[in-house]
Image (tube, rainbow, N blue to C red):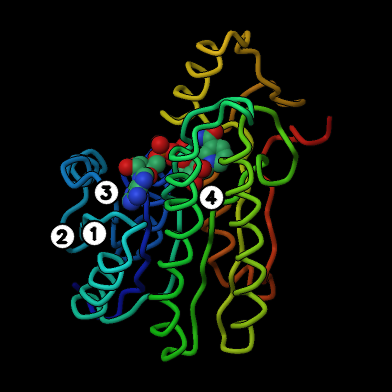
Amino acid sequence: MDQKKMVCVITGASGGIGKEVVRTFCGHGYHVAMLDRDGELLEKTMQELGLDHSQASCYQLDISDQEQVKATVARIKAELTRVDVLVNAAGIVGRYAKTVDYDFENFKRIYAVNVFGTFLMMQNVLPIMVEQEQGAIVNFGSVSGMRGYTLEVGYGSSKWAAIGMTQNVANEYGGCGIRVNSVSPGWVDTGMMQRTLDNYRELGENGEITLGPSHRPAKPSEIADAVYFLSSPEASHINGANLVVDGGMLLG
Ligand SMILES: NC(=O)c1ccc[n+]([C@@H]2O[C@H](COP(=O)([O-])OP(=O)(O)OC[C@H]3O[C@@H](n4cnc5c(N)ncnc54)[C@H](O)[C@@H]3O)[C@@H](O)[C@H]2O)c1
């Protein structure tokens, strides 16, 4: 890899949004470290995006596993030498249910990935950014982390936590040249959205979703553009913010 290239680490890189984040950062000349729990899909995603190993590197890991995160970030540091941007896009929605029926194992797994995984990635990447005296982190919240929607006590509260952690870390490291922000999408047209709609129907919900004045879900590329903006020099004084990208869905 070209040692002068900026490096962006993206978790959930094979997912609907993650893949577009990879495409966007590669398009802006970054070398991208693509992280996902599904190794085979990572290679397929690279092929699909037409990337070669001078543009991207693949790392399979489960972000909820402390040792795997530690070892993977150490490998990235050894192989790519730096981390300019970290995008924590990996996340799971789990199974929807009313609170009394919400399975505890499901709840714990959602927290393990969305909350602890995001924390572990930041904890292991931050020392590299502190040493560089420069870096940007973008976490994934959701409108689910800003309103008390029904059937998602676990997923929704995990996203409140992700937005909250963003502010904790932004405040702690803002003086070290590091900015930490979150993006909160409304509905985005990905596999996660389809799984959620299927789950609603299984629960006897009519599957009608609030889309707001745009009357459509976001395209994954529209979320990727917001992530790129937050990491870019154009956002140099934005720290601890939660950028809502929902087409106006929260307006009512
Ligand atoms: N799709 C939506 O409507 C929507 C709305 C708001 C927020 N979000 C958030 O956006 C982010 C991306 O969602 P998406 O729609 O692309 O979902 P997706 O299911 O298409 O992709 C998620 C990716 O994360 C990976 N992943 C899951 N658990 C992991 C783990 N333990 N370790 C490593 N990788 C793991 C999956 O393999 C997958 O590639 C998530 O944080 C999600 O909560 C999505």
- Which of label 3 and label 4 is nearer to you? 3
Q: Is residue 148 left or right of residue 106?
A: right
Q: Residues within 10 Å of mark 1 (few under 14, many from 20)?
A: some
Q: Tell me the residue that label 2 is attached to.
A: 53
Residue at (42, 89) in percent of width and height = 132
Tell which quarter ligand 1 is in: top left
When asked about the image quadrant of residue 7, the answer is bottom left
Cα–Cα gap, marks 2 and 1? 5 Å
Count the labels in the image.
4
Query: Which image quarter holds the C terminus?
Result: top right
Q: What percent of the width, then of the height, locates residue 33?
A: 29, 62
Q: Tell me the residue that label 3 is attached to.
A: 37
Q: What percent of the width, then of the height, locates residue 236?
A: 63, 75
Q: Residues within 10 Å of mark 2 (few under 14, many from 20)?
A: few
| Mark number displayed over residue 225 | 4
| Mark number displayed over residue 56 | 1
Cα–Cα gap, marks 3 and 1? 16 Å
Helix, strand or loop under label 4 = helix
The earlier-in-sequence mark between 3 and 4 is 3
- Which of label 3 and label 1 is nearer to you? 3
- Which of label 2 and label 3 is nearer to you? 3
The earlier-in-sequence mark between 4 and 2 is 2
Ligand 1 under 8 Å from disc 3 Cβ: yes
Q: Is residue 80 left or right of residue 195?
A: left
